Image: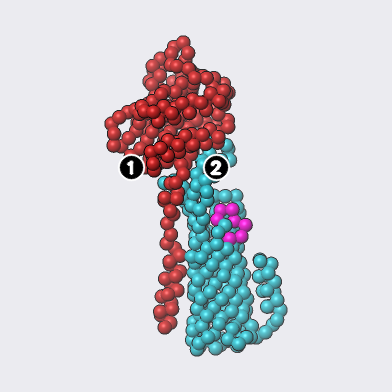
Chain colours: A cyan, B red
């Protein structure tokens, strides 16, 4: 899937089409974000509790820069299992609920192609930081770990200009943060995400 | 229209933040924690002593010990595990002087979680009459949940107590969840938790 997204980005860039969006105008996007963890030994179940905010300003008719943030809440119940410490001196057998909240905050740049009907397709890249907050609940205890790390988000999507000022938005992307979660040996936080929401683009077209 | 949509999206975004774990699901199974002294060599100890009674630390009762058929059943199961690991039960006497002393304590109806280590102990100290009243010493830290009922098993070094002037704790098992649910199931849960404590402590053998 990662390769597919990168391939789509490269293909889209190679098309070299020109979008016609007014330079200096802005687009605001917000909506629902679904996250699907990749190679995650801490939480592997998809997140349906998430959202995003994305603001973009057009510096050229086909290029925007902006900022974006989102939120994904992953959670999973893990059946009873024995965990042994590295030095073999302690062990605990328990079930647990694992939570992970991720909040990427990034600068983004997007490249737009010619409108296809009402859709304005684009490819983009977000670079910034990821705040990750993990909780493990077991018995009446809980353990928490949180940290900041570098974050990268390539994406492909489309702004759907249904109305004169307000439309829709859909995108798919890949979130990659080379950081651990504090509880397992995993050294990166990766997930695919799907965004579905609305777009506000007064005066952009 | 624009504002309504914005509010709708903000609500959806923030709604994802609110979630709490299902406590009933989490507490449906006992939690078994074991810790050992890293330097302990259990193979150099052969005999042990454990009482037929269970010490009681209870926020609602003034009783110090529990003596009933369930306790006896639990203690017999504990002895069986120790015997299977190559240790031999001995009564307390000057002649026998067992190498290991095992204390079993039930903690319940407390409002706080206990975290102890070093010289700290949770309410009473072991009494082996032929030694001065040494206190237990924990070479590690143990956290005990007390709201569900927890059985704590401490295995202490009696063999070297006179030299070290302390009861060095060599192994601790914390079995949590003993008091939840139906009475019969509790005994079963405690027994299963005890089995698991030994399963996850393969080094505990003569």
Asked if residue A42 lies in the magenta stretch, the reply is yes
Helix, strand or loop for disc 1:
loop
Q: Which residue is mark 1?
A: B111
Left or right of B65 on screen, residue B136 = right
Question: Could you say where residue B167 lies in the image, as x and y percent from the top left?
Answer: 44, 24
Q: Main secondary structure of the magenta part?
A: loop
Asked if residue A70 lies in the magenta stretch, the reply is no
Q: Badge 1 local density, few (<14 within 10 Å), some, or many (20+)?
A: few
Q: Residue at x 62, y 57 (%)?
A: A39
The answer to whether mark 2 and mark 1 are in CB contact below 8 A is no
Q: Residue at x 53, y 74 (%)?
A: A196
Q: Residue at x 45, y 65 (%)?
A: B16
Q: Which mark is residue B27?
A: none
Question: Could you say where residue A78 lies in the image, as x and y percent from the top left?
Answer: 52, 51
- Asked if residue A13 is positioned above or below residue B135 in the image, the reply reads below
Start-end of magenta stretch: A37-43
Q: Quadrant of the C terminus of chain B?
A: top right
Q: Which residue is mark 2?
A: A82
């Amino acid at each position: 899937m990662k390769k597919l997204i990168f391939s789509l980005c490269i293909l889209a860039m190679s098309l070299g089409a020109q979008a016609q969006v007014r330079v200096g105008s802005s687009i605001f996007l917000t909506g629902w974000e679904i996250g699907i963890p990749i190679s995650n030994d801490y939480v592997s179940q998809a997140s349906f509790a998430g959202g995003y905010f994305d603001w973009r300003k057009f510096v050229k008719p086909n290029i925007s820069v902006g900022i974006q943030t989102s939120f994904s809440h992953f959670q999973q119940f893990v059946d009873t299992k024995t965990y042994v410490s590295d030095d073999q001196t302690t062990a605990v057998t328990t079930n647990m609920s694992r939570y992970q909240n991720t909040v990427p905050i990034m600068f983004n740049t997007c490249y737009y192609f010619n409108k296809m009907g009402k859709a304005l397709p684009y490819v983009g890249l977000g670079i910034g930081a990821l705040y990750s907050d993990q909780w493990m609940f077991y018995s009446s205890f809980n353990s928490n770990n949180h940290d900041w790390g570098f974050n990268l988000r390539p994406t492909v999507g489309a702004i759907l200009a249904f109305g004169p000022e307000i439309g829709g938005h859909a995108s798919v992307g890949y979130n990659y943060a080379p950081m651990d979660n504090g509880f397992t040996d995993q050294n990166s936080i990766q997930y695919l995400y799907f965004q579905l929401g609305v777009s506000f683009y007064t005066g952009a077209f | 229209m624009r504002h309504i949509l914005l509010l709708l999206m903000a609500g959806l975004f923030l709604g994802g933040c609110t979630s709490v774990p299902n406590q009933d699901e989490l507490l449906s199974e006992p939690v078994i924690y074991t810790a050992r002294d890293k330097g302990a060599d259990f193979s150099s100890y052969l005999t042990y002593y454990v009482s037929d009674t269970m010490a009681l630390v209870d926020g609602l009762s003034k009783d110090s010990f529990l003596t009933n058929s369930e306790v006896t059943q639990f203690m017999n199961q504990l002895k069986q595990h120790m015997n299977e690991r190559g240790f031999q039960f001995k009564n307390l006497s000057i002649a026998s002087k067992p190498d290991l002393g095992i204390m079993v304590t039930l903690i319940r109806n407390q409002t706080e979680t206990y975290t102890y280590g070093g010289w700290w102990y949770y309410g009473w100290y072991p009494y082996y009459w032929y030694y001065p009243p040494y206190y237990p010493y924990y070479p590690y830290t143990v956290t005990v949940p007390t709201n569900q009922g927890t059985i704590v098993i401490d295995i202490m070094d009696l063999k070297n107590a006179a030299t070290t002037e302390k009861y060095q704790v060599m192994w601790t098992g914390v079995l949590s969840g003993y008091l939840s649910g139906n009475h019969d199931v509790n005994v079963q849960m405690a027994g299963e938790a005890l089995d698991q404590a030994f399963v996850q402590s393969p080094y505990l053998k003569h």
